[in-house]
Image (spheres, rainbow, N blue to C red):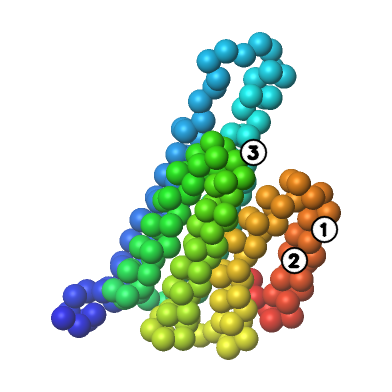
Amino acid sequence: MSDKNSGDSSPGHLHRLVLFSDAVFAIAITLLAIEIHPPHHWHGVADLFSQMGPKLLAYAVSFAVIGICWFSHRRVFARLARADGRLDFLNFLVLGVIALLPLATELLWEGGGQALPIYVGLVALSGLAMGLLWAYAAFVGKLVQPTPTGEAWFMLLRVTVLPGLLCGLTLFSLVRPWGWILIAALLAGLSWLGRKLKVA
């Protein structure tokens, strides 16, 4: 059955896809907080935060990660003119990875360093899935609004690399404070490149 016959290119298709995606992001970010439970016994605010420190830190990192992924998703979908069935499938891949982040966050605060490669790997996978979605929309499916080639490639670089790289650098910076300098340099470099290419 063709896209035309299946209604994949109907005017409301893209809008419904965005609404559904936003709901998944919102649920994932809400589940992060729901999974945080106070300790059974604590004495004073200092003791409470001492016991909950790893959980709150993992929550903060995951909140930022999902936020970055949502920004990437919004940037990609703001440039789309239409959607089709293949885009739906790739979008479901992205959302499937995002929906696993609350579980990965729980592993992070329970397993500590052992779960770190799993967590960072999952975040990197979310970027790869988003990059695949954009690559299909921009270069294969031709679903985007008129976009300069340089801007399309910059978008691919940004949405693919940024989530995993920022997550890894953030966790690294908690151990090695000079890692924050790398984060600042990365963001400044991407911002400069974006301005040169006039990418919003």
Front-most of 98 and 177?
Answer: 177
The quarter of the rendered structure image containing the C terminus is bottom right
Question: Residues under labels 1 and 3: Cα distance?
Answer: 20 Å
Label 1 vs 3, first from the N-terminus: 3
Where residue 198 appears, x then y in whole percent?
68, 78
Corner quadrant of residue 13: bottom left
Question: Residues under labels 2 and 1: Cα distance?
Answer: 9 Å
| In-image side of 67 versus 134 (left or right) | right
Give the residue pinned by disc 3. 57
Q: Is residue 57 above or below residue 175?
A: above
Indicate the amino acid at tag 1: Ile
Give the residue pinned by disc 1. 181
Q: Are marks 3 and 2 in contact (CB under 8 Å)?
A: no
The residue under the point 50% across, 69% down is: 128
Label 3 vs 2, first from the N-terminus: 3
Point out the frontmost of discs 3 and 2: 3
Q: Residue placed farthest to the front in the image?
A: 114
Where residue 83 appears, x then y in whole percent?
35, 74
Q: Secondary structure at mark 1?
A: helix
Label 2 vs 1, first from the N-terminus: 1
Where residue 69 appears, x then y in whole percent?
54, 58
Give the residue pinned by disc 2. 186
The residue under the point 47% across, 33% down is: 35
| In-image side of 133 versus 174 (left or right) | left
Indicate the amino acid at tag 2: Leu
Q: Secondary structure at mark 3?
A: helix
**Mark 3 residue crowding within 10 angstroms, few (<14) / some (14–19) / many (20+):** some
Corner quadrant of residue 156: bottom right
The quarter of the rendered structure image containing the N terminus is bottom left
Question: Residues under labels 3 and 2: Cα distance?
Answer: 22 Å
Please give the label number shown on residue 96: none
Q: Secondary structure at mark 2?
A: helix
